[in-house]
Image (cartoon, coloured by chain):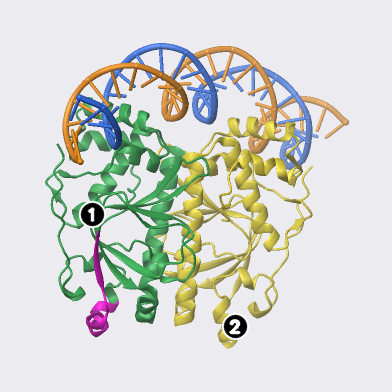
Chain colours: A green, B yellow, C blue, D orange
Amino acid sequence: MRISAALPRPPESCLECPIRAFTAYLPLMDRRPELFRALEREVTTIPARRVIVRRGDVPTKVFTLFAGWAYRYTLLSDGRRQILSFILPGELISLRALRATPMTFSVQALTEVVLCAFDAAKMRATLNDPAEAEYLVDKYMEICAEADLRLTDLGRRSATQRVARLMLGLERRLVARGLTVGDAFEFPLRQEHIADALGLTAVHVSRTLSAMRESGAIVLEGGRLTIADRRGLMEILGDGEPLAQR
Amino acid sequence: MRISAALPRPPESCLECPIRAFTAYLPLMDRRPELFRALEREVTTIPARRVIVRRGDVPTKVFTLFAGWAYRYTLLSDGRRQILSFILPGELISLRALRATPMTFSVQALTEVVLCAFDAAKMRATLNDPAEAEYLVDKYMEICAEADLRLTDLGRRSATQRVARLMLGLERRLVARGLTVGDAFEFPLRQEHIADALGLTAVHVSRTLSAMRESGAIVLEGGRLTIADRRGLMEILGDGEPLAQR
DNA sequence: CGACTCCTTGAACAGCGTCAACCGTGGTGG
DNA sequence: CCACCACGGTTGACGCTGTTCAAGGAGTCG
């Protein structure tokens, strides 16, 4: 049985937003809060599975994910899917939306989701600030570094290692957001999502998860994941490599 | 027999550099050329196989590759390697060097290589310009988009598709630089490099290349690659997906 | 109740990896 | 000049990891 908790709503003002620290706007909010008092914002709730932005679109809105999970993906012509990354609260649905160029990927809601939508043109104007630009470069450096880690996962690691690293990477990001309870957290991914993110099939993910449960490394039930044997999981990784965070 | 042509040298002034358009400095060079007249630059030649920057280093130099090929990579604790991308003339050895933070990957010379080295601190100061920052964000968007493509390759495509896409992607970048002759170009990758970039083994790359030669799709000999049957290669890809460029 | 989603399990199979032997080329040193 | 070696590539035999296809079960929703 899966309990879908009611999603929280953002406060009136962005300046008091609990997830400020994870957004792309942080430095500007600190230095020029007046920009954010004036900024028009539209809060929308979107059901699970809905496509939020589509590849090829030229975005007119900049979305920041306030609550829930989403993911970036591309489709191949034969219908197969590659999930590029999971998006957690505080993150922009796409930094790319800050440019008026076509999206190179699509984004879909994984759970029900609360979005803050800003007008793209106005946001571009607002963020037109030297310190902010530098911050964006930093953000992108992080994103690229994460992409490198994921590339290494897909290129050089076994199914079990990939799954373990995905879980620990997500846990770390959730910890930073205060979204874990002890060693447990909400884990809304279907096995198909895990498979499409890690370059596997859902069937094989099922087998892999069974083995990980069997070994006592994890408990995964009711949409909730518990890291039961952290040391054991770390050993699976077999490598001091940093974890993907995105 | 492999003929190693003598590498070209950059002109006295960056402003006349034939590869300007591929660098990260383009907008600033156009708007404030005086900055580049004053900029100290050190031109160095580095032999094949030498490591140029090492993961964990905090870079004190910013390198732009003037001639030759290099690649970004990481090593796993068991010694296996993942090549993250190939670097072609005009590209920064690492945009990351623009921040005084530790490198998250290493870079090695694939061929003999000519580098232009700038003092990192000075370059950071020079590039401290709003339009330039915006350009850097654009550059990073491209890099991330390429990473997404490669991720999709490793996650969802067969060995043959990966190899074909790597070749066509490299060809496209070389065409832009005027480094192709008809359908042919210098191709200094060993099979091991291809394997480490694509998440395969060298043995399997050997078999894959044999099959591609057999089918008449490519001619690969003496460090030179010819796209013999472009249509055939495109069909192998089986997909209208854009090509990785980096 | 039926329809749907998600997961599990089995059996057969394929793609790619591993191990190992061998070959051609070019470079080096005696 | 030749012996030797290092390097990159090729090929075969074999097997593991992960895929494919298919059937069935458990939970949920209308």
Q: Residue type at mark 1: give it.
A: Gly
Residue B173 picture quarter: bottom right
Q: CA distance from mark 2 to mark 1?
A: 45 Å
Q: Residue type at mark 2: give it.
A: Asp
Q: Position of residue D7 (x, y in %)?
A: 64, 38
Residue located at (41% from left, 42% from top): A153
Q: Report which residue position mark 2 lands on.
A: B30
Residue located at (31% from left, 43% from top): A166
Q: Please name whichever residue, B125 or A182, is drawn nearer the observer in this view of the structure.
A: A182
Chain ID of residue with mark 2: B
* Residue density around tag 1, few if under 14, some if 14–19, many if 20 or more, within 10 Å: many
Q: Please name whichever residue, B192 or B38, is drawn nearer the observer in this view of the structure.
A: B192
The answer to whether tags 2 and 1 share a subunit is: no
Q: Position of residue B142 (x, y in %)?
A: 51, 62
Q: Is residue A215 visible?
A: no
Element on which disc 1 rests: loop
Per the image, is A106 magenta? no
Residue located at (55% from left, 85% from top): B35
Judged left or right of residue A124, residue B43 is: right
Residue A68 marker: 1
Judged left or right of residue B6, residue A49 is: left
Bounds of the magenta segment: A28-45
* Residue density around tag 2, few if under 14, some if 14–19, many if 20 or more, within 10 Å: few
